[in-house]
Amino acid sequence: MTNAQLASIQWGVFLSVVFLLPQLLFRQLTFRSATITVYASMLFAATFLPMQTVAPRQSVQLVPFQWIADTFRDGQIAFDQMTLNVLLFVPLGAMLLFWGKRSIGQAALIGYGVSLLIEGSQLLWANRIFDVDDLITNTTGTALGWLGALTAVKVYARVKTAAVPQRELVSAR
């Protein structure tokens, strides 16, 4: 884990505490609000807080799947970045299924919209980049989160059904 990634996690935890404390103090804290608050804080910290860059970079990357060439050129770091982008949006997909009751198409569209908002805002930061690959990976992460949550719901329902003992039919004689 890089220092920048660790700093983002620390900022995310700090922001979570700052936003959760008032909810806790005023007895407004629910599991749903806590989950959304922690996720939004971590998402904000990972995407908006400036991280230092060694050298100035381009501000726009519009070539789809450029991360593949970057992986061959830069090694593991480009692949890790792509993987982390997918994982960052998995919780959003799960939340959209559980609490938003959205279809996979709606969830992917919302994930794309959130990602586009983030990427568009990064054009304003000197050390950030608008990356079309991030739009692709973040949308993919949202869809995978939705599918993973659906799978978990179906497995849970199947296990719960299997755990209920079947009553034997008693014949009346």
Image (cartoon, rainbow, N blue to C red):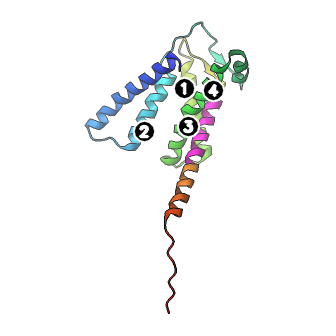
Residue where numbered disc 2 is placed: 35
Q: Which mark is residue 118?
A: 1
* Rendered image quadrant of residue 12: top left
For the record, the magenta segment spans: 136-150
* Secondary structure beneath label 4: helix
Residue drawn 58% across and 45% down? 148
> Disc 3 and disc 1: Cα gap in Å?
16 Å
Q: Residue furthest left?
A: 25
Q: Which is more N-terminal, label 3 or label 2?
A: 2
Residue type pointed to by label 3: Val
Q: Which mark is residue 82?
A: 4
Residue drawn 73% across and 19% down? 72
Residue type pointed to by label 1: Ile
> Disc 3 and disc 4: Cα gap in Å?
13 Å
> Tag 3: Cα neighbours inside 10 Å, few (<14), some, or many (≥20)?
many
Q: Is residue 13 above or below residue 123?
A: below
Residue where numbered disc 3 is placed: 90
Residue 144 location (% of width, % of height): 61, 40
